[in-house]
């Protein structure tokens, strides 16, 4: 059933309500919104915002366009009454379906990433086991790991030694 009060609102009343709703959602004061409009060349004060929100002054088209930009919405959004009743529920249902579809896609991505992570962890574990086995063979062969590590580090830093005594 159509609410007769809603049906009789003027475009200025609808826009005023929307401006206030968005401003509050964005945590803007009336003064801050006026300042943003001033930055665009409008002679807006806090009282201008208050009167616009209360539909006590007309909202010019150029103001509405720039105001929508400041608030981060489409101009049409400023002129559209909020959905109520079945229409609001229908929109909420569509939004729920879109969000669930996005979540489903993200779940699939997470599964792929989890599988990739598991492959990397398995590869790391294999490399650690191989390093441990090689270390164990060196120990069993009687190698002094501290001396071996020092010799390996020296060879890496200085390069191979020339047996003729020349570098």
Image (cartoon, grey):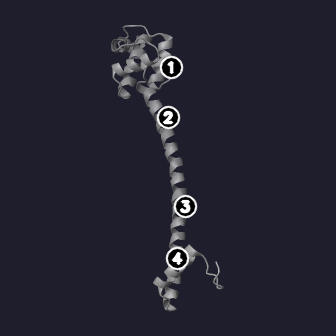
| Residue at horizontal 52 percent and vertical 87 percent from the top | 138
Kindly identify which residue carries mark 1: 76
**In the rendered structure, are the residues bearing label 4 and label 3 in contact, judged by CB atoms less than 8 Å apart?**
no
| Residue at horizontal 44 percent and vertical 19 percent from the top | 39
Kindly identify which residue carries mark 3: 116
Report how far apart the C-alphas of labels 4 and 3 lie in the structure. Answer: 34 Å
Report how far apart the C-alphas of labels 1 and 2 lie in the structure. Answer: 20 Å
Image-based side of 31 in relation to 95, left or right: left
| Residue at horizontal 50 percent and vertical 75 percent from the top | 128
Tell me where residue 56 appears, x and y as whole percent: 36, 8
Mark 2 or 3: in front is: 3
Tell me where residue 140 appears, x and y as whole percent: 49, 91
Badge 4 density bin: few <14, some 14–19, many ≥20, Cα 10 Å: few
Report how far apart the C-alphas of labels 4 and 1 lie in the structure. Answer: 70 Å
Mark 4 or 2: in front is: 4
Mark 4 or 3: in front is: 4
Q: Quadrant of residue 156?
A: bottom right
Mark 1 or 2: in front is: 1
Mark 3 or 1: in front is: 3
Mark drawn on residue 94: 2
Kindly identify which residue carries mark 4: 153
Tell me where residue 80 appears, x and y as whole percent: 46, 19
Dot 2 or dot 3, earlier in sequence? 2
Dot 3 or dot 1, earlier in sequence? 1
């Amino acid at each position: 059933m159509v609410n007769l009060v809603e049906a009789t609102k003027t475009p200025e009343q609808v826009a005023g309500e929307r401006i206030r709703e968005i401003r509050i959602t964005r945590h803007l004061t009336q003064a801050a919104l006026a300042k943003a409009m001033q930055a665009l060349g409008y002679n807006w004060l806090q009282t201008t915002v208050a009167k616009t929100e209360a539909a006590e002054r007309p909202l010019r088209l150029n103001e509405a366009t720039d105001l929508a930009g400041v608030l981060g919405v489409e101009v049409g959004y400023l002129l559209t009454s909020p959905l109520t009743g079945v229409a609001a529920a229908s929109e909420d249902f569509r939004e729920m379906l879109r969000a669930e579809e996005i979540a489903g896609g993200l779940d699939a991505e997470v599964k792929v990433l989890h599988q990739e992570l598991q492959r990397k962890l398995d590869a790391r574990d294999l490399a650690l086991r191989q390093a441990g086995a090689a270390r164990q063979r060196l120990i069993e062969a009687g190698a002094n790991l501290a001396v071996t590590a020092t010799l390996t580090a020296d060879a890496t830093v200085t390069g191979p030694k020339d047996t003729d005594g020349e570098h």
